[in-house]
Image: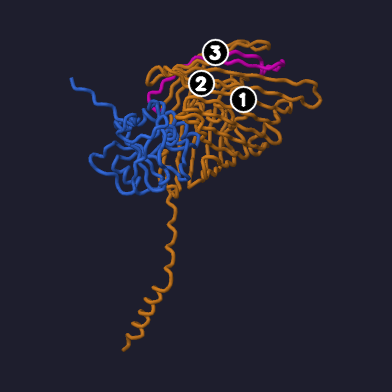
Chain colours: A orange, B blue
Amino acid sequence: MPYRPRARALALGLLASLALPAAPAPAAAPRFVFGRSPSVFQNDPDVVATRLGLWLDASYVDNDRESGSVDLNHVNLLVDTRWRSFQGFLEVEYENEVDRYGAEEEEEFEIEQAYLRFGPRDGASLRLGRFNTPAGIWMPVHWSILMETIEKPPHAARELLPEQQVGAELAGRLFPGLLRELAGQLDYAVYAGASGDAIGQEDVEGFTVGADLRLLLDERWLLGTSVYRQKNDEVDDRSELNLMLYGEAKLPAALTFRTEYLHQRRERPRGKPWDRTLDVVYGALRWDFARWFYANYRVSFGGDDGPDERTTDQLVNTFTLGIEPHPAVRLKLEYSLHEFSGGGRQDFDFWGTSVGVRF
Amino acid sequence: MIVVGAGFEGLEEISIPVLRQLYLGRRTRLEGLRVRPLHLPAGSLARNAFTRAVIGTTERAMERYWLREALSGGSPPPRELAADEALAFVARVPGALAYVEWPLRGREPPAGVRVVPVVVDGRVLRPGEPGYPLRLPAPRPSS
């Protein structure tokens, strides 16, 4: 007798559970994974995956104007986090570079990139924060461990365009079926940036705007164009309009040809009667002649129509031997000859060796 | 041969250029679905043949390519699984796409896994048909 109320309660409970819809199971908490390998991103997209990366390079460089030196040039730490269509990317860099074009030594520790990206589809993604300027070939992927040479091409060495933007970018990738069996890929980027000392953009004033469009055919032919406008707060407070044309071709016999051309128009600064233009161009031929080895030859030329010593006409011939004994190690041996005309700068030779390691 | 599973019911054929874009991480979606391409283990005959036919470059060039992708926040390389694991993955995970040797040693593909023909020069080709581009190299005659 004392158990009847319990039995009835139990029966009523069972009946009620059949009548009412089952409560939804609590959502599983996202899992978090960390690692150094990009394979962390091969998990379920609902997993919050973070990859840590580190690379560094050091060099011995010498020229006929000053004595040689051994330097640790770059130490870069990368943190890349992804969850579904979202990505957070952070790159912190220690940089110690000698500016052979202006003889200024740069040693600094800075946040190279820090951005959030939302990419729900291949055709459109939005990026906010600090990111490499999407102009040309060299600028977006300018890490020395990736580049064939120790010295940068002229437009990068002279910092004619800022390496980074702080702002917003809309970018995407389209796949037009241009020709049968010829894979076409059209990449676009439109961006705007801000200026100011607080965000590390002290060399520009006001807003910057730019766009980049490139066509890649069959992974062998690349053709692109970039436009970029800024107000240069460092030099004459002038407005600059830049146009780039660039291309790359994978040729037979393990040859790759690359070229970038920059035309910069410097508008009339307030109170001064002149307009000036600058043109720099380079062509480079890389030959992967053996499994671990490549040879690279680059010729670059450029200057402007004024007497500014920073932008005197300069012809540079650069010869590089690259050795890659391991995917994570790159050695470079390089010689270049710099010849000036129209200004007060003297010609000089440069030679150096560099080693880069990725962890 | 190319195999796909759930989500690709509308995919009737696939071309070598599209396969290349998927396996280089340049294209991440197909038929509105996030694609998860799978590689066979490095060094296997089938993978070497697939890389040669579809990617068309050397392993060292691919190592450089994936390093650049890693440093620039780009796509990760495809996941590596052995053939049986790849087929089970394709059967289970929407958007998965893999290549395996054909025939499957007398077996049929698991339930939910479908073979997709490859388009070459406008012709739709199935494994074993003349001109099918994904082939293992012919064995060398013994001396």
Q: State which region is magenta.
A: A300-328
Q: Spot the residue most to the left.
A: B143
Tag nearer the camera, 1 or 3: 1
Which of the pair A336/A279 is nearer the observer?
A: A279
Label 3, residues with CA under 10 Å away: few <14, some 14-19, many ≥20: some
The residues tagged by marks 1 and 2 sit, at their Cα atoms, a distance apart of 22 Å
Q: Give the x, y percent position of residue A137.
A: 55, 27
Q: Are marks 1 and 2 in contact (CB under 8 Å)?
A: no
In magenta stretch: residue B70: no
The quadrant of the rendering that contains the N terminus of chain A is bottom left
Which of the pair B99/A253 is nearer the observer?
A: B99
Q: Earlier in the sequence, mark 1 or mark 2?
A: 2
**In this rendering, does residue A334 appear at all?**
no
Q: Which residue is mark 2?
A: A150
Q: Are marks 1 and 3 in contact (CB under 8 Å)?
A: no
Question: Which chain is disc 3 placed on?
Answer: A
Q: Earlier in the sequence, mark 1 or mark 3?
A: 1
